[in-house]
Image (cartoon, helix red, strand yellow):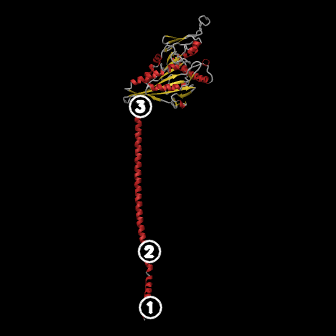
Amino acid sequence: MKAVACSPRVCADGFEATCPVNEAEAEEGAALIAHRVGEQRVVLADPSEEPDDILRANRSREKTFVFDMVFDHRATQEEVCVSTTKSLIGGVISGYNATIFAYGPTGAGKTYTMLGTDCEPGIYIRTLGDLFKVLEAATEEMDYTVSMSYLEIYKEVIRDLLNPSLGFLDVREDPRGSIHILGITEVSTTNAQEITQLLMKGNQQRAQEPTAANKMSSRSHAVLQVTVTQKSRRQAIGEAVRIGKLFMVDLAASERAAQTQNQDKRMKEGAHINRSLLALGNCINALSEKGGSRAQFVNFQDSKLTRLLKVLYAADSLGGNSRTVMIAHISPASTSFEESRMTLIYACRAKNIKTQVKCNLQNASYHIDQYTSIITDLCREIECLKARVKKKKEKSAVSSDLRDLQAERHQGSEAHSGQVMNTLRAQLMGAFREQMEMRHSPMEPKNTNIELHIDTCRHLLTITDCE
């Protein structure tokens, strides 16, 4: 891990101060105790040391710390960005993970270094601008997509700064050990202006409150994640997809209640901040001693901050697959001696952490083979389904033929039964007529006799009348 000591100070109007001591420290009569010696060395003098005090002649607390780079209050934002993050951009585009930490006591200038101002943009803006410049220069040969998410850890709960209406988000761990934040907003961007606007919008939602030590103290840890996915425009079977992730973490300020004069809600916030920073410090101590004479257990479960930094989207920001830079911010004033000393010790331990980075590649040939097998299985399934449909059609055709035959038989039976009924009806009618005729035949002679008798009587009457 790369460690950088930095002491940027910001005036109330937002511009970098030319004096390393602010107004509050000057009123307390603070003296300069932090001095830059060369480009990699910082000397922290003992503010209580007196040359005439013989009893404390061999008890000086003066310390010398060596880092990869040291900056004083005269350093510009461009110099800090070039020395810390510019070298990480090429690795992110090539598929490597990178993490940038800003750590230090309250009022030391962490947010100023990371976010900056309109006139002097910070690491966030400059790094993303350089990232898109490199990507746009390679658009003829490579296709790329850039996505970002921005969250904060406030009092051990996670909030989405791009969509605060979601409320507090839950952290879940899958069977493979990866940590996932449920419902986190991930936005795809195409240029640096869009991502800058999203970043500014999210930073306005961040928890910030004034304290006695800092008028705009950050009360939460902010984590910006940028994912770059890149692949070649040439359609080759063996082409690989590179996925690089960049994490920029603006940690909340470590603070003492006596210095900030916090009470009630601010006191509880400070307790949560110190708790998560203590968990982070314990992880750094264990990782810095890992591989030594004694085995060290790294407890990442004490805080949500350490859990996210350990396996946030499988990036392993601490002691894993990530190129990591820690920018330690200190105040050169004598009134902040203890805070500056502990911060520098913290950064020295982080510098001893060894990381093993590897390129995140997804082989396209593997995916093609996988898709080929999937397509083959789907084709087989389609053939089976077609055969089943064909069988069903054949069965339906046979059943329809049977139904037609049955219908024909039914119609034929109905016609035959109609003919039989007509025949039977005709036979019945004939039989009925024969019976009626047979009944009428014995009565015909009687009728004839009666008619003859009547005719005889009529003739007799006629003869009588004539006589």
Q: Earlier in the sequence, mark 2 or mark 3?
A: 3
Is label 1 or label 2 in front?
1
- The x, y position of residue 204, in whole percent, is 52, 25
> Element type at marker 1?
helix
Locate the C terminus and report the quarter of the image it occupies. Answer: bottom left
- Direction bottom: furthest residue: 467
Residue 354 visible, this angle: no
The label nearer to you, 2 versus 3, is 2
Q: Look at mark 3 in the image and give the residue it sits on.
A: 366
353 relative position to 132: left or right:
right
- For marks 3 and 1, give the one nearer the viewer: 1
Q: Is residue 330 above or below residue 361?
A: above
Q: Rounded to the nearest whole Å, what is the CA distance between mark 3 and mark 1?
A: 137 Å
Q: Which residue is mark 2?
A: 432
Residue drawn at x 43%, y 78% is 437
Q: Between marks 1 and 2, how big is the CA–CA gap?
A: 43 Å
Q: Position of residue 370 (x, y in %)?
A: 42, 34
Q: Which numbered circle lies on residue 461?
A: 1
Give 145 or 284, whichever is nearer the viewer.
145
**First of labels 3, 1 by sequence position:** 3
Residue 155's x, y, as percent?
58, 26
- Tell me the element at label 3: helix
Observer-nearest residue: 434 or 47?
47
Q: Amino acid at mark 1?
A: Leu
